[in-house]
Image (spheres, grey):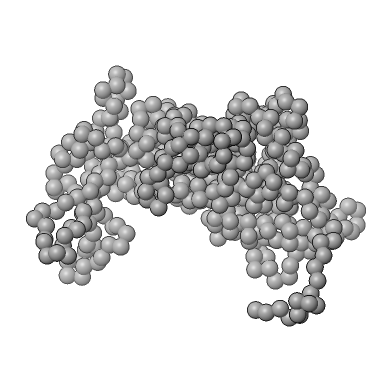
């Protein structure tokens, strides 16, 4: 593709007051208004500082900026251009929003989290956010270390993280999150918690799991709920909180001496081959040739802790270890295996329960969405301000996910960056006519025109009739 006119004959001028570059914010924020975002913040958040006034306008402003792609306080200027002031009320300057965030205390952050849980339940009512939630839902709990720079970040410390499969010490803040999903629906964020960079992985996980279960129930997850975690959360307190919430648990077990003894006691005829990625079909034997096998034994964990013993299933997957000297002509005398154990009280069959636990990796997709969007930075030196920023990022993620489900099947599972580029970052010109009527004129031939109109009609049209 080339310019039709020479550069010398092409001119540019930022002078049109009727243009907007993020027309998709109209149906997105209409959905937020329909779900009562401003009212929920007004009811729950009570900030005593002078810069904390009008929280019901400023918090949705932060959510809108994040939905538009802002990843820092200065980027909130994306809301202040062209006809945005005509389309939206209550837009604030980045400096005002920064002062608002710094007015938060830890108690105010918890109030905002409470508003976010109710907001998620309203989104689940207004959009098909979690299809099949009345049958089965999963909650995945994990943490990530977000690198920060400078010495002014409160709470920043060195903590472990994995980069390209290697465990490294990174100076930053630690984000603990619980995401809820169904086999048919993409994950949304049920609960978040910002912690100091050197926090132990399981710190606060029990209370976070309880809050996530409450949020999932409020969002309509009335069927079975399985909480999946890695070995960092293999703790009696976390499992007890999950059981009190009426859910099942599935946690990777640490390979200690007791787990190794339980695995060694499994007989050879108890192992069942499973369909594993890149398994090979053998025509002669008419079966899948795979080095992955699973077995199950009963197991009692935390027996040494008085009153905290838990008896459940230990599902073990073993994978044949590679013979690293096969290229030198040295064959193996016996098979060597690598073991992966899952401690669970899941009601599903062994192979199904083990496969479901491996799907715990989808929480990394949510972290990737956040780090490529609003969590690219933790923008403030104040710890509470960054915690409030994290909560707003979770609400923005859930809002854009709900808007994507209204647009269509593809966008119901698309990444956040795709939703922003296809549905939100659409240029439009506004035209006034009639009695206060406004029409958005969008680009002709936009490649996602029908999906955008689906989202617009569902958000700005009359509400769906109640059953």
Residue shown at 16%/51% (left/top)? Answer: 336
Count of labels shown? 0
Question: In this view, which residue lies farthest toward the top?
Answer: 306
Question: In this view, which residue lies farthest toward the right?
Answer: 435
Q: Could you say where residue 388 lies in the image, as x and y percent from the top left?
A: 62, 35
Give the image quarter of residue 142.
top left
Residue shown at 70%/26% (left/top)? Answer: 47
Give the image quarter of residue 140.
top left
**Above or below for 444 versus 217:** below
**Above or below for 460 versus 2:** above
Residue shown at 25%/47% (left/top)? Answer: 317
Q: Could you say where residue 51 lies in the image, as x and y percent from the top left?
A: 75, 30
140 left or right, relative to 57: left
Q: Depth check: 9 or 47 in front?
A: 9
Q: Depth check: 61 or 103 in front?
A: 103
Question: In this view, which residue lies farthest toward the front?
Answer: 151
Q: Depth check: 354 or 71 in front?
A: 71
Q: Could you say where residue 221 lies in the image, as x and y percent from the top left?
A: 50, 40
Query: Can you see residue 132?
Result: no
């Amino acid at each position: 593709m080339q310019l039709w006119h020479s550069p010398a004959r092409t001119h540019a001028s930022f002078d049109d007051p009727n243009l907007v570059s993020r027309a998709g914010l109209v149906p997105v924020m209409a959905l937020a208004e329909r779900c009562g975002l401003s009212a929920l913040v007004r009811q729950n958040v009570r900030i005593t500082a002078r810069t904390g006034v009008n929280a019901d306008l400023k918090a949705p402003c932060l959510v809108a900026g994040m939905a538009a792609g802002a990843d820092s306080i200065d980027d909130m200027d994306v809301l202040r251009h062209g006809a945005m002031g005509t389309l939206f009320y209550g837009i604030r300057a980045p400096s005002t929003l920064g002062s608002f965030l710094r007015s938060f205390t830890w108690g105010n952050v918890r109030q905002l989290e409470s508003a976010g849980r109710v907001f998620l339940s309203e989104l689940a009512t207004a959009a098909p956010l979690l299809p099949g939630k009345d049958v089965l839902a999963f909650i995945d709990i994990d943490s990530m270390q977000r690198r920060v720079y400078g010495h002014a970040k409160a709470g920043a410390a060195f903590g472990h993280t994995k980069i390209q499969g290697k465990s490294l010490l990174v100076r930053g803040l630690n984000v603990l999150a619980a995401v809820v999903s169904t086999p048919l629906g993409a994950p949304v964020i049920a609960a978040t918690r910002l912690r100091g960079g050197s926090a132990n992985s399981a710190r606060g996980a029990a209370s976070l799991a309880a809050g996530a279960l409450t949020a999932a129930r409020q969002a309509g997850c009335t069927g079975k709920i399985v909480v999946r975690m890695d070995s960092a959360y293999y703790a009696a307190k976390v499992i007890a909180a999950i059981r009190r919430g009426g859910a099942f648990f599935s946690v990777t077990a640490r390979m200690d001496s007791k787990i190794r003894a339980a695995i060694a006691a499994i007989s050879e005829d108890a192992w069942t081959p499973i369909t594993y990625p890149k398994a090979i079909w053998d025509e002669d034997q008419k079966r899948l040739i795979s080095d992955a096998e699973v077995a199950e034994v009963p197991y009692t964990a935390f027996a040494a802790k008085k009153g905290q013993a838990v008896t459940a299933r230990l599902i073990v997957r073993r994978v044949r270890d590679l013979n690293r000297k096969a290229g030198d002509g040295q064959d193996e005398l016996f098979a060597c295996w690598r073991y992966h154990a899952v401690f669970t009280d899941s009601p599903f069959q062994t192979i199904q329960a083990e496969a479901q636990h491996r799907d715990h990796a989808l929480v990394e997709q949510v972290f990737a969405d956040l780090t490529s969007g609003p969590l690219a930075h933790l923008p403030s030196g104040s710890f509470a301000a960054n915690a409030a920023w994290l909560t707003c990022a979770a609400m923005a993620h859930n809002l854009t996910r709900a808007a994507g489900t209204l647009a269509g099947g593809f966008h119901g599972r698309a990444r956040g960056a795709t939703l922003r580029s296809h549905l939100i970052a659409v240029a439009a010109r506004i035209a006034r006519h009639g009695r206060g009527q406004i029409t958005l004129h969008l680009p002709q031939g936009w490649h996602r025109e029908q999906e955008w109109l689906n989202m617009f009609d569902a958000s700005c049209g009359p509400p769906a009739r109640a059953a």
